[in-house]
Amino acid sequence: MQIEKRLRTDLEEEKTQEIAKLLDTLHTMQTQVEEANARVIKEREAAQKAIEEAPPVIKETPVIIQDT
C-alpha cells in the first residue's frame, strides 16, 4: 500500500513538473508571437509611410507616328 502511494505521489510530482515546463514553453511562445506581431505592425507602418512619401512615378511611353 505504501509503495502504491509513493508511486502515485511521484507520478503527480512528475505531472506537475511537466505542466510547469509546458506552461513556461507556452509563455515563451506567446512572447515570441507578440514580438513578431509588433515587428509586423512596425514594418507595415514603415511601408505605409514610405508609400505616402514616395514621389509619384511618371513613366514616359513612346508614341510612334507614321507618316502617311
Image (spheres, rainbow, N blue to C red):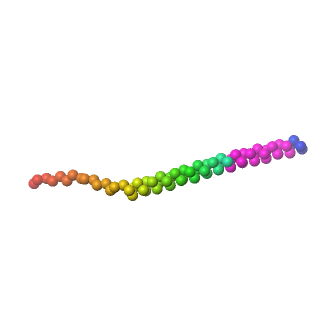
Report x, y in % for residue 57: 31, 54
Seen at 39% across and 58% down, the residue is 52
Report x, y in % for residue 65: 15, 53
**Over which residues does the magenta segment extend?**
5-23
Q: Is the magenta stretch mostly helix, strand or loop?
A: helix
Extreme residue toward the bottom, this view:
52
Extreme residue toward the left, this view:
68
Seen at 87% across and 41% down, the residue is 3
Which image quadrant: the C terminus? bottom left
Seen at 47% across and 52% down, the residue is 43
Extreme residue toward the top, this view:
3
- Seen in the picture, residue 19 relative to 52 is either above or below; the reply is above
Report x, y in % for residue 60: 25, 53
Which image quadrant: the N terminus? top right
Q: Does the magenta stretch include residue 35?
A: no
Q: 4 left or right of 48?
A: right
Report x, y in % for residue 13: 78, 45
Q: 19 left or right of 31?
A: right
Nearer to the camera, 60 or 50: 50
